[in-house]
Amino acid sequence: MPRRELATATSETTTPAAGETAEADSAAVELADSGMTTRPAEAEGEGTPRASASERGYDKGGPEIEATPEAMGQHTADEMHKVNMDPGYGGQYDLHAGVHYSYNYQAECKRAEPGLWKDEYRYGFHESGKFDNPKETGGFMDFRLKPGQSASAGIKAWLKGLTVAECLTAVFAMEYESLRAAIGDKKFDQTFGSANATEDAAVDQQGNRLRIAPNGGTPISQFMKATDAAELSADGEHKDGVLSDKELDDDLIPGQWYYFYNHPKYLLKHPGGAWQGENSVYMGRNEKGKRLWAGMGASNKTEEEMVEEMVHAYKGPRDDEDERTMKERGIKNEDGTYNDPKYDPAKGEFKAAVSKHEILTDAPYEIDGTERKGGFLAGAGQELDAAAVQKLKGS
């Protein structure tokens, strides 16, 4: 969802590189004539949202959920439901609310209020005034809480919107929100930014001011860990890190964060494309026992359906964002000639369309120093570290 790469990336991004537009449900690009949103409906077999903190009797400003992998994971899954406008989860999505992909928001503004869109929103934007936006920070999708602002109020405002971002940044925000719910507003503010001047000064001394960005170098990273499935995939005994269905069923917990790669050559066809892969949260199972996944704009998909989305996204023609990216990066000239022949469709380096089988089985391919292999990447699995969260909670 940045370089929309794995959430474990550590390098900071200042300008978009290949594919640095948010990945999204491809159906969301074509807006319905009569509706503002394009979010998928709730899948069969899902549960209902949990009771609010006040309904469960928690003290104001204190923890709202238990600091366990299951409770924090469920909170993350609920936040994904909310961002995707699933029925019953209380999300709102219009020109001044919700988390939008930049190209969706541009289309929505063009249709409803053309003067609202600004080209700088391609790099990210949040409306509340609590954050320095990417225009100020100079980093792609890099949002930093302003001094003197409450971090708990800030993360709630960011997820409520209006926010223009992509899925990697959005999932990091959801992890912050789950951490906030587990330790409470008071501790969250003392750790990441406070309206209390003394507390806020201490935050800066620790270097922990709330920052939401698509890389692993932000303060939330110290409270994240690899999932059991990710560690198992790296044990040297699983070819290409691929786990069996039984191993996944044994280890997956709703709310854990993984990654699906599109075809290894996707970025050759779509250099500015949104679907080189999907940062996905495990949502549990449907009534048929199928594992369900959700990314921002792709709600409650089985693994097969997620790959089908990628087939459709790959097949689409190059669009304005692809052309713009190639020209900005010096890949293609104004006269239509290519400085890098790999990107020229006439040279045959990539196909016009691929199948699900090809996404899953074609050989890895390297683009811009990153080797990609299509399909589910168990090794990318992350979750909040319950031990680290409990330590912070008790400090």
Image (cartoon, helix red, strand yellow):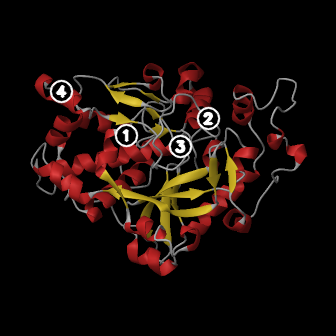
Residue 118 makes an appearance in the image: no
Residue 341 spot, x, y in % from top left: 84, 39
Q: Which residue is mark 1?
A: 159
Which amino acid, by three-letter code, is at mark 1?
A: Leu
Between circles 3 and 2, the one closer to the viewer is 2
**Looking at the image, how many numbered discs can be counted on the residues?**
4
Q: CA distance from mark 4 to mark 1?
A: 22 Å
| N-term-proximal mark, 1 vs 2 | 2
Quarter occupied by residue 118: top right
Q: Which residue is mark 4?
A: 200
Q: CA distance from mark 1 to mark 2?
A: 25 Å
> SS of the residue at dot 4?
helix
Q: Which residue is mark 2?
A: 17
Quarter occupied by residue 388: bottom left
Q: Residue at x 46, y 72 (%)?
A: 286
Q: CA distance from mark 3 to mark 2?
A: 28 Å
Between circles 4 and 1, the one closer to the viewer is 4
